[in-house]
Amino acid sequence: MLKVANIEKSYRKGGLFSKEKQKILNNITFECYNGECLGIIGESGSGKSTLGRLIAGIEKPDRGTILFEGNNVQDRTVRFGNISAVFQDYTSSINPFFTVEEAIVEPLKARKKDQKETRSRIDRLLYQVGLNPSYRKKHPHELSGGEVQRVCIARALSTEPKCILFDEAISSLDVSVQTQILDLLKELKKKHKMSYVFITHDIQAAAYICDRVIIFRNGEIEETVHLENLKDVQSEYAKKLLKFLITF
Ligand SMILES: Nc1ncnc2c1ncn2[C@@H]1O[C@H](COP(=O)(O)OP(=O)(O)OP(=O)(O)O)[C@@H](O)[C@H]1O
């Protein structure tokens, strides 16, 4: 369903006018199937978030394609209602002038629903991410970082997308809230065959929710492994990385 093929991405090194480029992603090819949670782990700076931005359609690859059900995610209408994204930097994810209710309802606006139905949907989404209805009228500055992040997750779930990209999206939450969100994602995955691309440093969270894990190294895929074989990765790099992440 999500098909990433031969992706390359470079950025200018040393500012806007520099001619020198640094390759961040090289020859990235993988698929994320319906109902699958695909983890992406790798060292800081290995290009995970860059890949996340390409999947979310925020940036364009220099080469290669990212297709969702056969259509290019660069096309907004392909992403709309199908792919959502939750990023680590939640402070810039929500308009500071919006209330929680407005933020959650924004992606739903294109769909004509009656107000009562929308309100009960907002309450259900808030409940699912562990917030009560009293949060509806609050603004982001009145919330803790973890609460804003939960609103971002509720917003990403609001359109019932087929695929959600999470980029370190739950790392900042309390362990109990993390578990609640992971359990919710597991349930939605089972019920609606949703799929997730789950970028994380948290090997425990990845082990809890992912079906397969891609190990990233310097902008390339080092190894892809099914969760049940995580302890038996082949490459020396993957062994070292996992050992580091598990003992860290
Ligand atoms: N817009 C940009 N312009 C120039 N360089 C960039 C840009 N975005 C990212 N980079 C560089 O690309 C490299 C990969 O960054 P990226 O954020 O994708 O890594 P990451 O694996 O997600 O790291 P982390 O785990 O720390 O979030 C880094 O060297 C970073 O400095």
Image: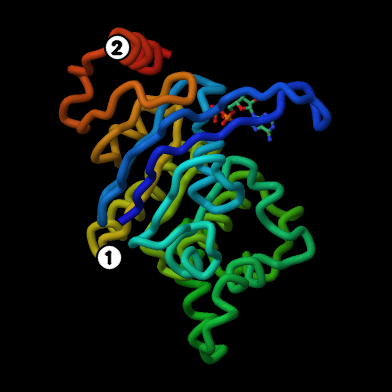
Residue at 30% across / 41% down in the picture? 209
- Image quadrant containing the C terminus: top left
Query: Which of pointers 1 and 2 lies earlier in the amino acid sequence?
Result: 1
Residue at 26% across / 51% down in the picture? 33
The front one of 66 and 115 is 66
- Horizontal arrangement in the rendering, residue 138 relative to residue 237 (left or right): right
Image depth: mark 1 or mark 2 in front = 2
The amino acid at mark 2 is Lys
Q: Is residue 238 above or below residue 37?
A: above
Query: Ligand 1 sits in which quadrant?
Result: top right
Q: Position of residue 169 (x, y in %)?
A: 51, 43
Q: Which corner quadrant of the image does residue 239 belong to? A: top left
Query: Mark 2 packing: few (<14 Cα in 10 Å), some, or many (20+)?
Result: some
Q: Position of residue 111 (x, y in %)?
A: 52, 83
Does the Cβ of the disc 1 residue fall within 8 Å of ligand 1? no
Q: Which residue is mark 1?
A: 192
Q: Secondary structure at mark 2?
A: helix
Residue at 61% across / 68% down in the picture? 134
Residue 239, numbered circle: 2
Q: Secondary structure at mark 1?
A: helix
